[in-house]
Every structure is written in C-alpha cells, then in structure tokens.
Image (cartoon, grey):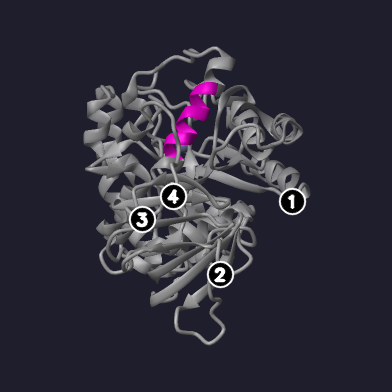
Amino acid sequence: MRTFFNNCRLVDGTGARAVESALVVVTDDQITWCGPADAAEAPTPVAGDRQVDLAGRTLLPGLFNVHVHLALRLPFPEQRIDPFAPGYRAMLIYRRALEAIYSGTTSLRAVGEAHFMDIAVRNAINKGVLPGPRIQSAGSALIATGGHGHNSVSCIEADGVDGFRRAAREQLRAGADLIKICLTGGIGTPGEQPADKQMSDDEVAAVVEVAHGANKRVASHTGGSQPVKDAVRLGVDCIEHGYQFDEEAAQMMAEAGTFLVPTLCVTQELDYMRRHGVQEWMLTKARAAAVEHLNSIRRAVAAGVTLCVGTDLLPSDPVDGTVATIREVELLVEAGLSPLDALRAATFNSARLCGVERLTGTIAAGKQADLIVVDGRPDVEIRDLRQVRLVMKDGAVFRNELPNLDAPGLALPGVELAGGTFARVY
Ligand SMILES: [Zn+2]
C-alpha cells in the first residue's frame, strides 16, 4: 500500500527549514520519497495508491520521550512499597505506552522500571504481539544504598565496584538497551538535595565499562556542577535532569558530545504535582530547584549541548493544556532553543541518543514511517505542536483526525482521554 501525503509542509527533524509545498510517500511501513512536490523526480500516483490532501498542515517525525517511567504513580511513596503485582504493572505500562503513541510520542526510552516489565512490553511490541510505540528499556535504575530513588521499586541498590558491575550486568542479561544510574540526589526522594553526590567515581566507571563493553549507553540522573563534570569525565553518555550546573560543565558536555535530557517539566510544572497531591517536601524541593534548573539548561543551550526531550511524567499526561511530551518541547523553546531546534531535540537528537537514527527520528527515504501531522507551523510557532491530527508508526495509523483519510486508528476505550496518572485505572 502506498500513501501520498500531498500538499504538506515538511519538517524533517534534522533542523533543516521546512519544505513548504512537499510530498511525502509512505510505502507499507517505510517512507519511500519526500521532498518538494514539484521536483522532477517526485513519484506520480497510480491506481490503488491512497492520496491524502494535508491542506498545508505540517508533517514531521513522530516525537520521542527519552525519560519516562511508565508505571509512574503519584504522589511518590516515602517508603519502598510496590502498589502493583508484576503482571498488572506490565498491563499498566502497555496501556500508558498506547496513550503515549496516541498523543504523538512514537518512541519512548524507559529509564527505571521494576521487575523488567518495560522490557516485557518492549518485547511484545517488537515481536508484533501487540501494537505500540518503540520502546528502549533500562530495566531498573542502579543507585547507591540509600541513594536517589531508594523509595521506589524501580531502583535497585548496589555498593562498590563489584556491586555495580553485577547490577549492570543483570540489566544487560535481562535485555536492557541502556543502563541508568542515579549519581546524585533529586526531587522525588526525601532527605537529599539534587547536587548531593551519592556514587563514587569508581562505581560510575565500573558501570560505564560494563555498558560500553556491550555497546550500550549510560544515562545518569545528575545535578550539580561537580557531579556533571565527573559524569562527563567518567564517560557517561547522557545527563538526565541537570538540575544545576555552571558554564564550565555545559562546555564539557558540549565538547564531549554528552547528551542532556533536561526534564524541565519536573521543576516548571508544579501545578501538575499539586493536582496529584504531591507532598509539601517534594513541592518545596521542586520549587527551590526551578529557577536554577531553567538557568542551567539555558547555559547548555548557549554552549551548544545536544538536548533531547524527556519528562519523567507520562508522555500523555495533561500538562498546561497539552500533554507532557509536547509541553517539554515548549519549555525547551523557553530555555532558548528555536522552535526548529526544539523539534530536532524531540526527534533527531533523541533518536541519536537511542542509537536508532538510521531507523527513525527523521523524515527521509528509507526511514520507518513514524510521523505526525499537526495543524499550523510548529517550526515557527511551537504551540502549534499541540494540534496533532495524525500519528503513524511503521506506517500503521494510531490516531487519525484528518477529514480526508479513511483509517480508524486505535480502538481502545478511553485512550483519547490520555492521562494515565490522572485516569485512576489502577
Ligand atoms: Zn526519572
């Protein structure tokens, strides 16, 4: 089956300017042609091809959210308790993965989940057992004993070089795509600050050695200038959050090619936290971190650090009139990226972080057909990204609000209400 998306604006995700009168051709699960509609080599439709007039809407790559915990439950418990049996957890993760793709996030990176249930859901989707988004899974996050996230069942505690090596190898054995560590304190655990360093250098280096030996990347929850510098120096591939760091740390990230996933939603969207009944101690920490977090990300933008899009919140959760993934893209614009660069952060940059840039993350011939269509011009006015009308992954339609495309999309009760932590279905 060939589909001709006619009369669209093409934003390909690389940061290149929009092609104003574009044609994008999808054949089965892949993009087979894209470019100016009047190009001499543009293919012409034949009988049987599906033709869709996008009426000047913008077509762009499906969005990534590279920092999610799909079994998220708020408010966070202060003690380590597991509210879900493992099987139910898997179903909850799957449900929320569907809500994510419905809302425009076609690729997810799960950075800390209990019982390898993110890996189970990933495998089911990859094998075609169930439809859903692309998922990369870290398995459990690795933390020092008593470290950040010890109050969450999605983290496992380790100590010393041997302990962290073993914990990292256990994630790889279970099929993890990356290793997640918490180098410093954060917001969601009481009794610590975001710049408190909790892992020793030799522990970090041990995890990096194990992960890189298996050609996997290390993502490190990190706040504070010195911990960020230590992480970069020790070979960590990606800084998560970056709650506070100075210009020198930003320069080091830029020079080393270290990725940064700011998760600005965590400190900038306190209303979301409040509506979830988040405790005062956590609100106080988030509030205290907010200004310096945003300023740090501004320093990263100025230094040219490669930014990606992640939220900690569920990708589909309602935030400030849109969903979390899209709100985070807007926040990156508030931190100083141009709309075009913020869209690149949500697509090409995040695909590079996940090592899937040859497969997806841009609109180009030969890539998988992971794309969204929105009303308006999000590369000029980022808030237009809120107006998602079509979501496609591997050429399959997951959401369709286009008047002239006959494809049903997902048929799941209530999925249009996307917003798993508010849904109270658990
Ligand atoms: Zn997180």
Alpha-carbon span between mark 2 and mark 1: 44 Å
Q: Which residue is mark 1?
A: 215
- The first of marks 4 and 3 along the sequence is 4
Label 1 C-beta lies within 8 Å of the nearest ligand 1 atom: no
Along the horizontal axis of the image, is 332 left or right of 177? left
Q: Which residue is mark 4?
A: 391
**Closest to the observer, 223 or 196:** 223
Name the mark nearer the viewer: 3 or 2: 2
- The first of marks 3 and 1 along the sequence is 1
Question: Whole-percent x and y of residue 65?
Answer: 46, 46
Dot 4 amino acid type: Val
| Label 3 Cα neighbours within 10 Å, binned few <14 / some 14-19 / many ≥20 | few
Name the mark nearer the viewer: 4 or 2: 2
**Closest to the observer, 362 or 393:** 393
Question: Whole-percent x and y of residue 57?
Answer: 33, 64
| Label 1 Cα neighbours within 10 Å, binned few <14 / some 14-19 / many ≥20 | few
Give, as a single range, the part of the protein colored magenta: 91-100
Does dot 4 land on a helix, a strand or a loop?
A: strand
**The stretch drawn in magenta includes residue 104:** no
Question: Whole-percent x and y of residue 224?
Answer: 43, 47
Quadrant location of the N terminus? bottom right
Along the horizontal axis of the image, is 41 left or right of 288? right
Name the mark nearer the viewer: 1 or 4: 4
Find residue 46 and name its label. 2
| Label 4 Cα neighbours within 10 Å, binned few <14 / some 14-19 / many ≥20 | many
Which residue is found at the position 56% from the left and 76% from the top?
A: 43
Alpha-carbon span between mark 4 and mark 3: 15 Å
Dot 1 amino acid type: Asn
Dot 2 amino acid type: Val
Q: Which residue is mark 3?
A: 404
- The first of marks 3 and 2 along the sequence is 2
Q: Can residue 173 be seen in this snapshot?
A: yes
